[in-house]
Image: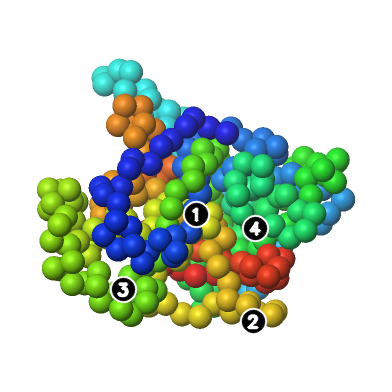
Amino acid sequence: MNATFTTPPRPFDITALFPQLVPLARSATRLHPRPGSPTVHDSSVGGPLLWPADEPWPHCDEPHDRHASQTVHSPDDVRLLRRDLAAAEERLRLDPEAPEVTPEERENWERIKVGRPWFDGPVPLLPVAQLYARDVPFPCPPDADLLQVLWCPFDHAGRAHPTTALFWRSSATVTDVLDAPPEPPVIQSQCYLPEPCLFSPEQVTDYPNPSELPEELGAQLEDMSRWASVDPALYSDYAYDPGELYLNNLCHAPGWKTGGWTRWDPTDPVDRPCPECGTDEVPLLTIASSEWDGGSGTWIAEEEPTNPAPPPLGARDGNFTLIDIVGGHNLQLHACPADPSHPHVELIQ
């Protein structure tokens, strides 16, 4: 696990104003990913997986659009570019008069920007996340204590995002680990290659998005007179009105997390029936493009101002994994509560 991160207290107790929210509360676990060097025994983003050596590595057999990106690069190209950018940033931090680019870095960039030849054929999936139940609470099938999430690093027909695959397993049964899993020869975008990060799990409380509230309670939230007892000074720095305050700062935590409620922004709620049994699926894992944004600054961890973990060079503020989903959105994976091993549902919000 990584360092400890703590979500600041909410501006005020929303359940004191609207006690009807109390039975609607759900536990969520903020994962607080930060760059690190995970091993197969860690819960992580983009780290190595505890994958059995005798189990075939999964591939994507769907067609991939060669015109989705002008140039494609290998995962190692992207890693080299990131290392060079980080080295340049550190060099200039230590010596503002140092060269912005070294000859070797320039040579690397000139080679990488040309891109790689297109690849036709099954694409090995990329590791996205690994979660041990000992570290992070989430629903598991019987006899499983490990969730592994992989994806194909290309968009697909009708889905402008990577397609995910979930694997559940008992970690105790994996005695011989695959040392060098195959990687895709090329990927559509560098933002589909997660930067290795470790987690710092923290339990928080989520409440429903306004669009999922009972009709009467939703109307009360929009009634300004119900908020008369709330001092505007408690929220005027980061919200124009109490409704915005609830949406961005009270109902659900942003960023990578397990559990909680679905965010529903920008779309309205839709049913998420299990493809196998029809049970309504619930949030399992949120793969986020950022840990916070301009409207959710109150969720920035208390430790961040005094010990900031700057995102990698060129990333948006709060994006430590370097993943970007459809221009800054979230990919929310929903699982069947009756049996998490049933097919999952993907949702972009």
Residue 292, percent from left and from top: 34, 49
1 or 2: mark nearer the eye: 1
**SS label for mark 3:** helix
Q: Please rate how many residues cluster around mark 1, counting C-alpha atoms within 10 Å: few if below 14, some from 14 to 19, many from 20.
A: some
Location of the C terminus by quadrant is bottom left
Q: Circle 1 sits on which residue?
A: 27
Q: Circle 3 sits on which residue?
A: 217
Residue 186, percent from left and from top: 59, 56
Distance of label 4 from label 2 (alpha carbons): 18 Å
Amino acid type of the residue tagged 4 in the rendering = Pro
Distance of label 3 from label 2 (alpha carbons): 28 Å
Q: Is residue 316 visible?
A: no
Q: Circle 4 sits on which residue?
A: 139
Residue at 74% across, 44% down: 50
Distance of label 4 from label 3 (alpha carbons): 29 Å
Looking at marks 3 and 2 on the same chain, the residue that comes earlier in the sequence is marked by 3
Amino acid type of the residue tagged 1 in the rendering = Ser
Q: Please rate how many residues cluster around mark 2, counting C-alpha atoms within 10 Å: few if below 14, some from 14 to 19, many from 20.
A: few
Amino acid type of the residue tagged 3 in the rendering = Leu
Specify how the rendered protein is coloured. rainbow
Q: In which quarter of the image is residue 346?
A: bottom right
Residue at 36% across, 31% down: 303
Q: Which of 50 and 215 is in front in this view?
A: 215
Q: Please rate how many residues cluster around mark 4, counting C-alpha atoms within 10 Å: few if below 14, some from 14 to 19, many from 20.
A: many
